[in-house]
Structures are given as C-alpha cells and as structure tokens.
Image (cartoon, rainbow, N blue to C red):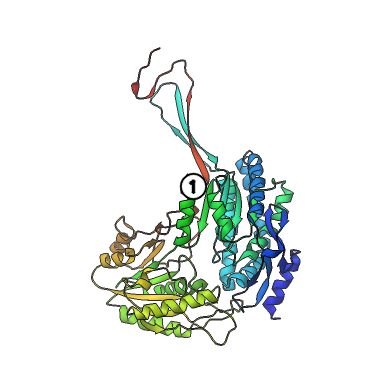
C-alpha cells in the first residue's frame, strides 16, 4: 500500500470509521444503519482502487431524518443568533484541527490536488468565521410610515429545513455555504452529498460531532443522508423542505426547479458555467498566463468556474497561442498527493470518455487540436492530458459546458465590444474575466452592457472566488447566490410589521371608512 493510502487508513481509524460504512444517515450525532442490499463500492479516481463500501439510504430513512429535522428546528430557531454563531465558531475550529485529514479524504475521493483540497477545507473554516460574525448582523429595516403614530419595520425569520444537494467537485465547501450560514440564520439542514464523494460528507459530520455534543445542539440541526438521485428527487418534491439548494448540471437544476416550483417552494441553483477570459491587446500576458492555466487545469477542469474559453485579440493571438502550447507541453498529469502536481485525475471513467468525445466532436466541427488530449498510459487512474483547441464560439462543443481540461482558443478583432459579445454568446453566465491595462476597457467590461455573468473579474481569472462575495451566475447557471455578501437572505423569510401605537385607526392611501 502506498504512503497516501496508509495515511487514509490511519484517518479512518482516528475517527473510529471503517472502510465499509454501514450507516446511511446522520441526525447530528446519531447514525442510522442502511440496508445491506444498497451497498455500493466507492472508487478513488487517483488509482481506480476502491476506497471502501457505503450503504445508500432509502426513502423511509430520508423521511425519518426529515422528522428529526422538523423537531430540531422548533428548538434551534429559539436560540439567540449570537449563541448559534458561537456554536458555528467552534465548528470552524474543529475543521481547523482536522484540516489536513479532511483534505486528504477529498483528494483521495475527488482527485483534487492536495493544495486545492486544503484550500477547500480552508473555505469551510472561512465560512464559519464569516457566519459567526454574521450572527450579530442579521439586520432588518425601520421604514417611515405615512400614518401618524405608526411604526413600520422589516425583520427576518428562518425558513425551516434547508435541503442541500451538492456535487463531487466541491464535496464539502458548498455544504458549508448552505448549512453553516443557514444554521446561523436559525435553520436546520439535510445534506445529500454526491454519490461519488460520500466519505468527505461522512468525515465532515464526524468532525463536528464533538462540538454538537458539547453545546447540547438539538439532534437534527445538521443532517446527512447518503443516497442516490431518488433522495434528491424526494427532497425537491417534499413540501417540508423550505429551500432546496442544488449544485450541479443545468439539466439536473431544471428538474429540481420544476419540482420545487410545482409546490411553490424556494430553490437556490448553482449550475453550469462556460467561463471565458478575454485578453485584450493591452493585457499583461505574464499575469494572464498564470490565471489562464490555473483556471483551465485546476481540479482537472472540473470546476463550475473553470476557464473554458480564451478570447484573444488578433494582435497578440499568435504570441498567446505559442506561449500556452509550450506551457501545456510541460504539464503532466500526476498523483494529486505528490508535491508539484497541478493536474490530477478526472473523477471517473465516464468523465474520461466524455473528455475524449468532446475533443472528437470539436475536431469534427472544424476545431484544431493544438496540444494534449488522450489518456495517460503511465498512471493507473483517470489521468488525461490537458488540451487546447482552436475553435469558433458558434461550435456546439464550445457552446456546451465541458467538465474537463479542454481550453477553447478563440480569436477576436476590432474593439472590446466584439470580445464581450463573444463572451456573452453562450447560454451560461457564471464567471468571466478580462485582462487589460486599459482603464476604459476594464470599465466597459463591468458596465451593465458588459459581462452578463454573476462574476466579472479584471486582471484575475475566472476561478477561485473569495467567500466574502455572493457566488452565483445568471442564465442557465440558475441565478442563485450563495456564500458572502447578503446571500444569507436566501435562508430567511422577510416579514413587514406595522405597529399602531396611537388611539386612531387611519388607513393607508388616505382612505376613509366609516361604520
């Protein structure tokens, strides 16, 4: 057994967890056993060797968790927000203490390079810090009334149960955005992690168990259900789930949105991205190259914010192409646990197949493969060579999200308006970037007529958002906003209150009504 496998085995032992995990759901600190017939093997993308076996929950188990969550909400919402924030602060410290262990689980299960996995756990810690401060800042408004001796105000109340459906590429950070901020707001949560990364979710709950016990947190505030798509479907159709936050493909998000809308529930969607970086004739190319490469090959191109299109002005196009091809020739896929690796594996064999199919489709549409492509023959996992393809924005392969390390190189001429038109000329609208040292170009890019994405960056890449800003996108990205800024309002319901402290009963709009 290799060193990283030995380390993982020690982490399992540390948390009193075996590779065969027979529990399928957790309500805070209590774990429920699954049905033996539902046992599933989890394969590591690092070496295509099993990590272990887990059991999937059935619908009955899901509803038992919902029942616990309902009871917990009645108690949790009554705890003052700053005291909820103190619990969250301690949860953040628990993740600090176990940062490296959880990062190694993420790398083994999702295939992320260890540096990225460490960064993801740090994101959880940062969210806990943010939420602890937020617990004293859930502000409402005082509104001037048109009626004398009346006071109007807005206040915010928790929604209830927040359902979280997360994807494999960020197997714990997205949970924290929703569960941690939701909890500070007074909500409880039920988390259905990706079937591809259940151990990350298991260990996240193992990490917070001690904190929940020490603070006598009601059983059912933080809940976990390990299941397949049937659990996600049940959650989106369940009227007891006040908000469903779903991260994944646009196709998945549309199903969730339809199910939730049919019962007039709330949904928060973080879906596909088809992100572009514009390099104008005024770009600092030394800066730009680092951002382009990280954005395109980070997480093996499996981030929703990955750089998929590079839109380059014709005056610098040939230089950019030459420099990028030379860099890509030096990028070799390797084990994500090894220091210096920047390109780890794709998540599974299906992803490898889709990578190859997308390259073939692009070539058939007239694209030109400049470098990369193909499966590594030296490594026993899902390792591919990052590819650059010269293409046109109208190609179907470019229009669709390619969840793999394929960078489409696109040329533009004329003014910045032409580049922005190309940037906006896709169905998705998550992240965007421009590199320019021209003030007017930068301002045009972030103006209302500029980028139509939820994220617009100047002189930095599309990937690697900070937790302090609201994260999300427009169009087929779903319109959701999570993490920082005022995204906390998604997890609360607004209430307008008017108090009459006088002795008269005036009506609004000057209406008189005599009895």
Query: Relative to 38, is 397 on the left or the right?
Result: left
How many labels were placed on the picture?
1
Q: Does 265 appear above or below 123?
A: above
Residue at the outermost bottom position? 378
Q: Percent from the top left, x then y, of residue 172?
A: 59, 61
Q: Is residue 130 above or below residue 307?
A: above
Give the residue drawn at x 60%, y 55%.
191
- Give the image quarter of residue 348: bottom right
**Circle 1 sits on which residue?**
266
Question: Residue 183's x, y, as percent?
Answer: 60, 48
User: Which picture quadrant has residue 362?
Assistant: bottom left
- Where residue 114 sits in the image (x, y, percent)? 59, 72
Q: Where is residue 272 in the image (x, y as percent from the top left)?
A: 44, 63
Query: Outermost residue, front direction?
Result: 37
Look at the numbered disc 1 and give the secondary structure of its residue. Answer: strand
Q: Can residue 438 be seen in this view?
A: no
Q: Using the rendered image of the protein, determine whether residue 232 is visible from the camera's viewpoint.
A: yes
- In the image, 85 versus 409, the foreground residue is 409
Which quadrant is the C terminus positioned in?
top left
* Up/down of 322 relative to 219, above or below: below
Quadrant where the N terminus is found in the figure: bottom right
Q: In this view, does 392 lie to the left or right of 137?
A: left
110 or 501, nearer to the observer: 110
Q: Nearer the viewer, residue 459 or 312?
A: 312
| Location of residue 8 with respect to 63 vertically, above or below | below
Label 1, residues with CA under 10 Å away: few <14, some 14-19, many ≥20: some
Residue nearest the observer in this picture, 130 or 268: 268
Looking at this rendering, what residue extends furthest in the top direction? 515
């Amino acid at each position: 057994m290799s060193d990283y496998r030995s380390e993982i085995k020690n982490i399992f032992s540390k948390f009193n967890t075996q590779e065969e995990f027979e529990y399928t759901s957790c309500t805070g600190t209590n774990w429920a056993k699954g049905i033996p017939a539902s046992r599933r093997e989890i394969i590591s993308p690092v070496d295509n060797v099993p990590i272990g076996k887990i059991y999937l929950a059935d619908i009955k188990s899901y509803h038992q968790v919902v029942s616990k969550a309902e009871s917990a909400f009645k108690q949790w919402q009554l705890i003052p927000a700053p005291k909820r924030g103190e619990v969250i602060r301690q949860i953040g410290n628990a993740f600090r203490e176990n940062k490296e262990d959880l990062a190694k689980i993420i790398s083994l299960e999702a295939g992320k390079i260890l540096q990225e996995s460490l960064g993801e756990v740090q994101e959880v810690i940062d969210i806990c810090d943010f939420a602890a401060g937020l617990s004293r800042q859930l502000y409402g408004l005082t509104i001037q009334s048109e009626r004398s001796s009346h006071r109007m105000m807005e206040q915010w109340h928790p929604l209830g149960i927040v359902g979280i459906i997360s994807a494999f590429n960020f197997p714990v950070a997205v949970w924290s955005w929703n569960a941690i901020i939701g909890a500070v707001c007074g909500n409880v949560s039920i988390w259905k992690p990706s079937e591809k990364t259940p151990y990350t979710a298991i260990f996240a709950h193992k990490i917070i168990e001690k904190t929940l016990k020490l603070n006598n947190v009601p059983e059912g505030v933080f809940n976990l259900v390990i299941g397949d798509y049937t659990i996600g479907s049940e959650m989106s159709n369940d009227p007891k789930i006040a908000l469903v936050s779903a991260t994944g493909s646009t196709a998945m998000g549309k199903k969730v949105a339809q199910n939730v809308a049919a019962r007039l529930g709330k949904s928060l969607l973080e879906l596909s991205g088809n992100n572009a970086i514009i390099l104008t004739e005024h770009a600092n190319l030394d800066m730009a190259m680092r951002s382009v490469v990280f954005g395109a090959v980070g997480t093996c191109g499996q981030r929703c914010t990955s750089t998929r299109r590079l839109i380059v002005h014709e005056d610098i196009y040939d230089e950019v192409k030459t420099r990028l091809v030379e860099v890509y020739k030096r990028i070799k896929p390797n084990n994500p646990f090894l220091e210096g690796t920047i390109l780890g594996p794709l998540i599974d064999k299906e992803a490898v197949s889709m990578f190859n199919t997308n390259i073939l489709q692009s070539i058939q549409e007239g694209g030109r493969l400049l470098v990369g492509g193909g499966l590594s023959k030296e490594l026993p996992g899902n390792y591919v060579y990052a590819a650059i393809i010269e293409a046109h924005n109208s190609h179907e392969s470019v229009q669709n999200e390619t969840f793999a390390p394929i960078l489409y190189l696109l040329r533009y001429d004329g003014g910045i308006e032409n580049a922005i038109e190309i940037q906006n000329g896709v169905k998705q609208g998550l992240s965007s970037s421009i590199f320019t040292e021209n003030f007017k170009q930068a301002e045009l890019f972030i103006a209302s007529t500029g980028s139509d994405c939820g994220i617009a960056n100047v002189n930095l890449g599309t990937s690697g958002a900070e937790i302090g800003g609201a994260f999300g996108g427009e169009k087929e990205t779903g319109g959701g906003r999570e993490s920082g800024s005022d995204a906390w309002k998604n997890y609360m319901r607004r209430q307008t209150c008017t108090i009459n402290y006088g002795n008269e009963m005036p009506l609004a709009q000057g209406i008189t009504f005599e009895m």
